[in-house]
Image: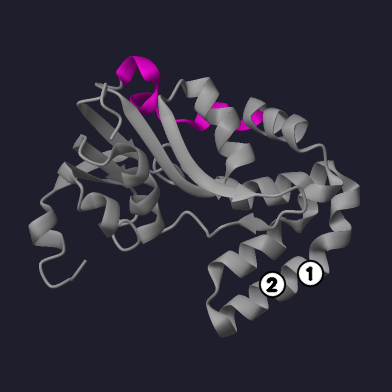
Amino acid sequence: MNSHISELDIYDFDKTIVPFDSGSLFCVYAMLHYPKAIRNLPRMFFAAVKYLKHNDLTAMKSDIFCFIRDIPVEKAAKKFWDKYEKYIYPWAKKENRERYSVMISASPEFLIREVAGRIEIDDYFCTQHDADGKIIGINCHDREKVRLFKEKYDGTQVVSVYSDSIENDKYIFSLAKNCYHTVKGKKIPFRYEDKYKNDKI
C-alpha cells in the first residue's frame, strides 16, 4: 500500500482521456514520418492475421510495435504529442482533477510517459516494450490492470474510475465507489451492480 495516499481516482487513457487509440494512431504517424519503419508493414500485417486466429494480444502487439527499432522513439513520441495533445479532454487535465490520479493504459510506456508528464498525472501503469517492440511481461489489459494497481496501491480507497470500455474495464470498475463510462468525452455515471449484475469477477 502507498501509505501517504488515502484516496485516488483511476483513469483509462485511450478513448477516455483522448478520443482515439493512441497506439494505433502512433503506428500511422510513424509510417508517415519515418520511412524506414515501413519495412515492418508485412510483419505487422501478419501479426494482425495471427491475432484473428489465436487471440493473443500480447504476441500481436509485440509484433505490431516492432517498427520502433527503426525510429527515434522518444523524439517521435514528443512530436506525436506536440500534434495531438490538443485533443485531450479538458476535464482530464490537472486543474480539473479532484484528487490524486492514476492512469492505467494498455498503450506503450514510451507514449504514455510523454503525455503523462504533459498532463501532470500523479502515477501511471502501462504496457512495457523493449527496444525491439517486444512486450516485457504481458499487455496491461483487463485483470493485469488490477494486478499492477494493487501491487502499489492495495488498500487505498478508489473513489472514481473513468473508462470508455464497459466490457474490458469491468475489473478496474470493480474497485471504485463511483463508475463513469466515458462516451465521446462525456462522463456517464453508472452503478457497478446494475451494469455487471450477471458477471463474475
Residue 136 percent coordinates (x, y): 61, 54
Q: Residue furthest top?
A: 95
Residue for point 42% across, 30% down:
123
**Residue 140 on image: x %, y %:** 47, 54
The residue that label 1 is drawn on is: 43
Whether residue 183 is visible to the viewer of this picture, yes or no, is no
Q: Residues within 10 Å of mark 2 (few under 14, many from 20)?
A: some
- Is mark 1 in CB contact (under 8 Å) with mark 2? yes
Is residue 92 in view from this perspective?
yes
Going by the image, does 137 lie left or right of 35? Answer: left
Left or right side of 164 for 119:
right
Q: Which range is magenta?
A: 83-96
Q: Please, what is the three-letter code of the amino acid marked with disc 1?
A: Arg
**Above or below, 139 relative to 84:** below
The N terminus lies in which quarter of the figure? top left
Q: Quadrant of the C terminus?
A: bottom left
| 163 on left or right of 195 | right
Distance CA(mark 1)–CA(mark 2)? 6 Å
All told, the count of numbered labels is 2
Q: Which mark is residue 47?
A: 2
Residue 194: mark in rendering = none
Q: Secondary structure at mark 1?
A: helix
In percent of the image, x 30 and y 22: which residue is there? 97
